[in-house]
Structure formats: structure tokens, C-alpha cells
Amino acid sequence: MAGTPPGTGLAPAELERFATLAALEAVARRRLSEAALEYVAGGSWDETTLRENGEAFRRLRFRARVLSGVTAADLSTTILGRPVRTPLGVAPMAQHGFCHPDGEVPAARAAAAAGWTFALSTLATRSLEDVAAATVDLGGARRWFQLYVQEDFDLSRSLVERAEAAGYEAIVVTVDLPMVGYRGRDLRGTGLTLRRGNFPNVALDDTKTIGRRHPPLTWDLLDTVSGWTRLPLIVKGILDPDDACLAVAHGAAGVVVSNHGGRQLDRVPASIEALPAVADAVAGSAEVYLDGGVRRGLDVVMALALGARAVFVGRPILYGIAAGGEAGAARAMEIIRMETERAMILLGAQAIRDLGPELLIPAVR
Ligand SMILES: Cc1cc2nc3c(=O)[nH]c(=O)nc-3n(C[C@H](O)[C@H](O)[C@H](O)COP(=O)(O)O)c2cc1C
């Protein structure tokens, strides 16, 4: 059934049979067209960093201590000073519409219901106002808006102002895409290029290319963007501790340690490898988040232990909506939450504050 148009998806009862993100991904792979799958799954160049994002987590080892008496784990914490039920979020991803006809709405609704933060991409298939309106009935949705600064500063500014007006709580400025990475899967022709999408937030249709509409990205740009809003600024795409410090010096309230899921510069470190030095350098002066390769609750616990305040998940959420719409995304979120809680209990950690670098074996952390 390859190439089946996404839409109906599996029912919630059927989704319960899937107990891992890998199993949900297998369902999604059968339902997505080859082009959509290449776009979502692909990385840049040899996809070295894409592979390493996952492998680097699997190289780390926990220090197993026993008889802690812990029987339950509490995932609640704060992000940017506000209480949240989980330290988890959906990474900003362009064009959920390639995976589900309702675009970003299913994942945004699932996130609101599960207490996850939802980051909406500038290049979303649905307008930022639509996505905000679609989660109103669920209450308490934590939404961030991801900004690709556009060449047209008036347009960029209006995006930020619209996001603030629509109740988004932070502006995530993505800094690792001065141009798109060399993505062979998209370039070889069978792949899907963003040209074939639609972009209501930036009022571009598929007759215009978006690849060259970015201004040169500089540190000054962060000052410009923060001049447009009272919302906290989060800088996404940091791998180097010196850059993390510069981001903080330019007013960032948070940095996302990310290599764009291995889609931008290849042969950069895996996110989890880059995290400890960034967390050390920032030393509490801003929050540090991580995305890239998170597929297991074990990965979440490791990232939190090594200094992440929150952990964002990308592709598995798109596979969730491809497999079963809102219920599919909800199932993906539930799997990660259950795995995270289980891992914390087995580690003897009752709460997020109990997670620190001492839980990993020093030689490999
Ligand atoms: C299909 C797809 C589209 C993406 N679009 C964006 C985007 O519009 N803006 C952005 O900042 N990051 C984008 N990213 C990167 C994600 O925010 C995130 O860094 C990455 O997916 C995390 O890795 P993971 O997929 O291994 O969890 C995209 C990633 C994917 C897979």
C-alpha cells in the first residue's frame, strides 16, 4: 500500500498494539508516498550526522544503582519559568501536510492534550492562527513559533507580531539554515522539495521557491528580532559552547542544541555529544534544550541528565500523524512518556531534579 494518501489512519484501539516509536514508524512508512517519506526521513550529504544522532545515545551507559525505593516518577517541571506536565516537545517541522491532510493541527492538539510544548514552523501548512484556534478547547496549550528570518524584514516582523498576538509563548529563531543543506534524496528528483508545499504564514505558494529568501544570518539579527517582541527568544541550531554564550549575550532565554536532525551541515557532532559542553558554558544563564535522534525514553532521560531542560522530538511525531492522525501523535507521545517514566523509576529518580550527570558512567558521558 505504498503511496496511499494519508488521511484515515489507524484507530486509537489499533494504535495501542504499537509499543515503540519504531513500530509506529513502520506503519507510517507503508502509508506515506515515497516522496514524502524521503523528505521526512532524509538527511544531508552522507547522512553521517543523521545516523550518529541516534547511535551516540546508544553508546552512553547508565550507572545502575539499586534499592532506591522509588515506585513512581513525576515528569513535571518548568520551561521558561512556567509549569509544564512534561519536559517534552514537538520540534518545529515544515509541512506536516505532507503527512496528514489536516497539517499541523493533529500534532498540535495531541501535544496540548499530553502536556507537550508544540513548536510551529514558519513553513507550516496551516496558518499560525489556525493552529492556535484548533487547540483552544484543550486549554493550556504551550505553543512556540519557529522563525526563519525572511529577506523581507517587514514580513519577518509581522510573523513575530502575529505569533505574539495568537498566544505563542516564545520565538524560536533557527540559525543553522543560511541555506538548505545538500540533501541528495530531495535533489535526485523523486524526492519532494518544499517547492511543492504551501506556506500560508509567509504567503508563498508553490509557484515561488523559498530557498533563497533568507537574508545573511548574523548575530545582529538576533538583536533585531528581539526588538520586535516581548516574547523570550530561543536560538535553535547551536552545537558549539562559544556560540551558546554568544546567543545568551545577544539576549537568548534558551538555546536548542540541534543539528537540524542531520539535515544541514553533515559531519557535525550528534546533539547528545554536543550537549554537555553547551550546558556547562551556559551554566544556568539560559535554558538548554536538545533535539535530534530522540526515539526512546532512555534518550530523554540521558539528555535531561546531561543538562537539557526539555527535549524535542521531530520525525517520530510526523510518523505518528501519518499512522493515525491526532491519535497517532498521541500514541507516540504516550510511548515516550511511559518509557521515560519507567527508565526514571529503574534509575531511582523520582523527579526531574533527580537527573544529573552522575547517573551516567563518567568514561562514556
Ligand atoms: C521533515 C522535517 C522538517 C523540518 N523543518 C524544520 C523547520 O521548518 N524549522 C526548523 O527549525 N527545523 C526543522 N526541522 C528540524 C527539526 O526541528 C529538528 O531539529 C529535528 O527534526 C530533530 O531531529 P529528529 O527528527 O531526529 O527528532 C525539520 C525536520 C524534519 C524531519
Image: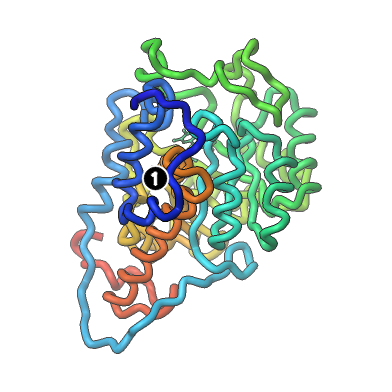
Image point (79%, 42%), residue name: 161
Where residue 232 appears, x then y in whole percent?
68, 53
Where residue 11 appears, x then y in whole percent?
45, 48
Asked if the residue at label 1 sits under 8 Å from ligand 1, the reply is yes
Where residue 282 appears, x then y in whole percent?
50, 58
Q: Is residue 161 left or right of residue 297?
A: right
Viewer can see residue 264: no
Taking depth in this image into account, of 209 and 61 the one nearest to the observer is 209
Image point (52%, 23%), residue name: 179
Q: Quadrant of the N terminus?
A: top left
Which element type, helix, strand or loop, lies under badge 1? loop
- As drawn, 253 above or below 29: below
**Type of the residue with mark 1:** Gly
Where residue 52 appears, x then y in whole percent?
27, 41
The residue under label 1 is: 292
Would you identify the image quadrant in which residue 356 lies?
bottom left
- Figure colour scheme: rainbow
